[in-house]
Amino acid sequence: MKKRQRFKLNKDKRRENAKMTKQTISNTSIPVNTTVGLKFGFIGLGMAGCNIAAECAKYTDSNGGSPYSAVLVNTNIRDFSKVKHKKDAFTEVRLSGYEGGAGRNIEKGEKAFKDNSSEFLNAIKPLSDRDFIWVVAGLGGGTGTGAIIEAVITLAESGYAEKLGLILTLPRHNEGGNVLGNAFKRIQEIGKIKDAIGSIIIVDNQKLYTDFLKKEENKAKTMDDFLTYCNRYVADTLHELNTITNAYENMTMEYFDSSEFENTIKQSGYLTLSKLTLIDKPDVSNEAQFVSKLKESIENGVLSDGYNFETAQTAAVTTIANGGQVDYITNMAFESKVKEVIDSMAPYLDEYPVAGYKANNTVGINIYTIFTGLETPTCLGIIGQKYDEFIKAKNAAKKNDEVLERLNSLNHEKKETNKPKDLRALLSGNSNKDEEKTNASSNLRGLLDR
């Protein structure tokens, strides 16, 4: 294992990218006025992608500016008005000719992007100084799902292929056949190009939704509350990952600095990250108290799960503890047990750092892991499975339309009724009813055959 010389802190890189931030992240321990490691650019496609990209661009530096840049691309112009963050934090690209939206039609969404590609290329010019660009889209709708492949190709052809990654949200399993079908089609195409770009982060809304409802206080909240939570959770998670190594004092022989982080996310394949918080010092020799919890946190992930860690190409472990617990995470027993867990799950990694940092403001011991270069996770396969189940059920319902079969079996021919024409004869009682009765009785079979 290579030590400090391999994972050394790139001070020039840190100094170049250091930006002071004001926000306290709600679900993290990152302090106020910390620095970012990499200058990210975000390109949001469609409503979901725009909301997440705008959320990522919300962080401000000490001068009121943003350490991140964002470009929001959409058809439905009304969606832009729903973005609550400062307008100067991002650039809007309105896909002219499609202002009413794509209506979950991915062919329409793709054409809308193609027809406005020149406007898109002009809008992304300010992103040329970014260390890495994340294209963000929700899979299932019309604009984001429709535009994602064309956007990636356009960016790659414009020289961004080496610093380009994806953040893709998956629909919940009950959002309907059209949504699942759209997501399934794009998942197949993304699989064909994944080795030509950097890391892909999957945000599984089904997983986040299930976790969200596990908290009693969330059960009375609305779907808008959940979507806001998701957008903020994705943004905070990525920002937290981008600030960890710059926020705290390193206490170990190994580093995982911004340059290592950059190399990690440039790795092709899928990326997953986890976070385990232990309030008290764990007994590393205790399987249930430490080892099983660490394995479980890695397998569950923060944003998605279902990964085969044996396919991982790169990994990193970063641990943060306060002054009273920092000695614990720097001892050989702790480092050895962490590596034992990682080696058992991802045995084919060449090398990976296990870095430790001191943070007086943090509570407990926080262990972060990141794995990249992973093969397709099962959560993507489940989308295909749910779509297949939907189609089969739909076709079965068509074949067994019992009401329609009964209707088709009925005789729909209209019986003609000959109304009497001599109304005076009816009033006088002089009618031919007796004659009609005689004729009818002589032809009963004719009546039955009507």
Image (tube, rainbow, N blue to C red):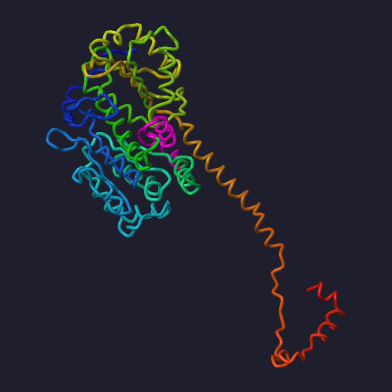
Q: Is the magenta stretch mostly helix, strand or loop?
A: helix
Look at the picture and state if 418 lies above or below 222: below
Residue in front for this viewpoint, 263 or 238: 238
Q: Where is residue 160 in the image (x, y as percent from the top left)?
A: 29, 40
Quarter holding residue 112: bottom left
Quarter holding residue 78: bottom left
Instruction: Let me know if residue 216 is in the magenta part.
Output: yes
Q: Where is residue 373 in the image (x, y as percent from the top left)?
A: 40, 28
Q: Quadrant of the C terminus?
A: bottom right
Relative side of 419 to 273, left or right: right
The region drawn magenta spans 189-218
Relative side of 252 to 304, left or right: left
Instruction: Let me know if residue 191 is in the magenta part.
Output: yes
Q: Which residue lies furthest to the right in this view?
A: 442
Q: Which residue is drawn at 69% across and 90% down?
A: 423
Q: Where is residue 345 in the image (x, y as percent from the top left)?
A: 45, 18
Relative side of 356 to 149, left or right: left
Q: In which quarter of the image is the N terminus?
A: top left
Residue in front for this viewpoint, 210 or 301: 210
